[in-house]
Image (spheres, grey):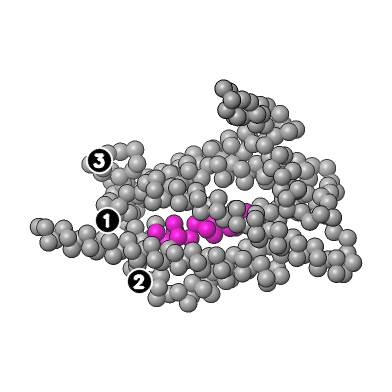
Amino acid sequence: MNGANIAIYFTGSNKPMSMVVEMTIREHIEELRVRVLRIAVVIIVLTIFAMTFDLRPIQINGVPLAYPYPDPLHNISIRLTFYMQESLLPEDVSLIQTAPGQAFFSQIYVSVLIGLTASIPFLMREISAFISPAINTKTKIGLLNVFLPSIALFIGGIAFSYLLVIPFVLGFLYEYGEALNVATFLTINNFISFVMQFFLGFGIAFQLPILMYGISLTDIISPRFWRANFRYAVLILVIFGALITPDGSGVTMWFVSIPMLLLYLAGMIIVEKRAAAASASAKAAKTNT
């Protein structure tokens, strides 16, 4: 390795494992730029689709299906906003628009969330292809060990916040306002931003076991690291929970921190089991030779 020409051995997902290409740092950064651009294009296309098209029901041979139909005023984002408004807002709370364009920009936020969620499989594919050179070649990043768990955890984080956290927070804050005899009106921008922060915060936070598993594949740190630093993890996760909860009540941060602690424990167990299985496999291979 010399100066700026530090070499990285890359086996990218589009090349056979036997074709090892030596890349410089500049080439590696260029590859990252290309992959980020691809991800951005996919998210933008899906975002525009959610803002432009509606899904109209249709039956084919008795099977209920849906087809995309261009209708910007009754699009997928607006339907999702209606559903969130009906299911999340307390009974006596109404959404208002205090300036022209607030409703339109709120739909952009919702569309971005739809685009981001729908692009997770592609996003995970690009990330895994980029980091694959640093991962032990004996361990493959595949559908069952990374992609499906990532999607399930992201959707699980959104579902957890939607079903439990957001209704509790909105109800708690509304009742607190009622106790002070304060009428509650929410601008549509504030409501969507509030919900989006929870959705994205929980969706990303629930990726913790995948992050721990991915780091373990690189062999950068020992599997014992996670158990040895558990006390620090508790402190960091509590602080993280306080930072991503937008209400500042000090109560809702535990809705983030406690699930993340459980996910941390799950990730720790998965990493330790993988290390034990790898060790047993190595011993078996030595015995056979």
Residue 45, given in percent of the width and then of the height, sits at 58, 35
The earlier-in-sequence mark between 2 and 3 is 3
The residue that disc 1 covers is 1
Task: Judge whether residue 256 can be spotted in this image.
Answer: yes
Q: CA distance from mark 2 to mark 3?
A: 34 Å
| Secondary element at tag 2 | helix
Which stretch did the figure color magenta? 199-213
Mark 2: amino acid: Arg
Task: Judge whether residue 29 can be spotted in this image.
Answer: no
User: Residue 133 bears which disc, if any?
Assistant: none
| Secondary element at tag 1 | loop
The reply, left or right, for residue 55 in relation to residue 210 is right
The residue that disc 3 covers is 19
The reply, left or right, for residue 152 in relation to residue 55 is left
Quarter of the figure that contains the N terminus = bottom left
Give the residue at the far front of this rendering: 62
Q: Is residue 209 magenta?
A: yes
Mark 1: amino acid: Met
Instruction: Give the number of the mark in front: 1 or 2.
Output: 2
Give the residue at the far left of this rendering: 289
Instruction: Give the number of the mark in front: 2 or 3.
Output: 2
Residue 233, given in percent of the width and then of the height, sits at 49, 72
The residue that disc 2 covers is 224
